[in-house]
Amino acid sequence: MDKIIIEGGKKLQGEVQISGAKNAALPIMVSALLTDGWNTFENIPDLVDIKTAKRLLKSLGVQMEGDGALKINASQIDNLEASYELVKTMRASILVLGPLVARMGRARVSLPGGCAIGARPVNLHIKALREMGAQVDLVDGYVEAKADRLKGAEIFFETVTVTGTENIMMAAALAKGKTVLKNAAKEPEVVNLAEVLNGMGARITGAGTDTIKIDGVEGLHSVTARVMPDRIEAGTFLIAAGITGGDVTVCGCDPEYLDALIAKLIDTGMEITSTEDRISAKRRGPIRSVDVRTAPFPGFPTDLQAQMMAYMTVAEGLSAIAETVFENRFMHVGELTRMGANIEIQGHTAMVKGVPRIKGAPVMATDLRASASLILAGLVAEGRTEINRVYHLDRGYQEIEKKFSALGADIRRVKV
Ligand code: EPU
């Protein structure tokens, strides 16, 4: 298994190009299940999760060509089951449930089970499908759903769920009649998916607000569409500029989707300027501590909480970081502490007392964003940091060590 080795202490400088968003690409690839004919999706990132999504779609009988510009044809679907093997590798596999029931009338998808960041149930996906007239049973660890044709319904999500909103939006696109999703997720990735579905002939309005209306249609056609840039990758590089006291321009991103992060980074003492698709970030003075509370979009993203915590370990003063989206997303705390950080967990809040410096150590993490936070800590730590279980990073960051290296970091991957 690969390791990443960082010699800390280099200030990052230069430009970095942002890749396509993992969390937009996954539902967009799955949306091809709703259509006949060849779809083309551009700006698909080169990630392990994307390879898993390809395996999943192929297992259903879908044809595929290309990589960055990925062509997908789901005219022939000959298997309606997403196996435990695939779902346990990637929870987003649950996204095939809605489209398969809507187009094929049935689906069998393994229940994801808990994961490193929380219990993460899919009860709201299931409840919504039942409200649309599907018969859904839980049999031997699988969700078995069937419906002759889904019916439009008014659905209230009691918790904001990103993939839940996406799953049901896809299902409702082919349902009979009108569906209204209330307390829907407002994440930009939901908007990107709605645009793609509308390009296929769906009739969706309100994506990006908490009420999404979908007028079901009889059929959808193929489309050529582009995946949005990855706002979490962009945010990770902005925080890297802050933690190293560097000067970094993040290119090919959507600054409007990073408002919550940018406001916090300015409060820490960073100077930030943006144009339509670039953000420049630098820090010269000391790092001021800030409090952070994660929330669904447009709040501070949970997917940037671990990286922000790494930044706060070397700030002046005390920072309270509250995680409100997932119940168990503090696995990075133990590893950051091993590097000399001073962090105490009080319920859902991590109290981070800034220290003048942290020190390199061998570390590992059990999820993607926690691993990214260890890279950031390694960039500022004295001496060598060795990050194990790099496959977590490869799930969601394209060529992360190459991008950091081009910015002047002393970072390399070692094959073990
Ligand atoms: N929830 C339920 N029941 C459900 C669905 C969700 O209780 O049926 C709860 C979850 O347990 C959680 C909260 O609702 O406490 C929000 O979960 P959500 O469903 O929004 O998460 P998700 O759709 O499974 C996506 C991203 C995550 C990101 C979250 C929150 C994808 C493929 N994944 O997950 O991304 O953290 O939204 O923004 O879009 C990552 O990229 O590292 C990652 C984990």
Image (tube, grey):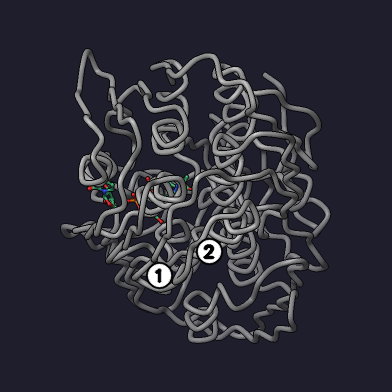
Up the image or down, 117 lies above or below 342; here it is above
Q: Nearer the viewer, residue 209 or 304?
A: 209
Q: Distance of mark 2 from mark 1, alpha carbons? A: 37 Å
Viewer-side label of 2, 1: 2
Amino acid on which disc 2 is placed: Val
- Residue 298 lies, in percent from the top left, at 43, 74
- Mark 2, Cα crowd under 10 Å, few <14 / some 14-19 / many 20+, is many
Image quarter for residue 13?
A: bottom right
Amino acid on which disc 1 is placed: Gly
Q: Residue at x 28, y 66 (%)?
A: 183
Pointers 2 and 1 in contact (C-beta within 8 Å)? no
Mark 2 and mark 1 lie on one chain; the one further toward the N terminus is: 2
Element type at mark 2: helix
Q: Is residue 120 visible?
A: no
Q: Nearer the viewer, residue 246 or 29?
A: 29
Up the image or down, 29 lies above or below 1; here it is below
Q: Which residue is mark 2?
A: 191
Q: Residue at x 46, y 82 (%)?
A: 288
Image quarter for residue 171?
A: top left
48 vs 407, left or right, is: left
Q: Nearer the viewer, residue 289 or 35?
A: 35
Q: Which residue is mark 1?
A: 354
Q: How many marks?
A: 2
- Residue 34 lies, in percent from the top left, at 54, 38
- Residue 302 lies, in percent from the top left, at 40, 59
Q: Residue at x 61, y 46 (%)?
A: 25
Q: Is residue 50 visible?
A: yes
Q: Residue at x 58, y 67 (%)?
A: 239
- Mark 1, Cα crowd under 10 Å, few <14 / some 14-19 / many 20+, is many
Element type at mark 1: loop
182 vs 6, left or right, is: left
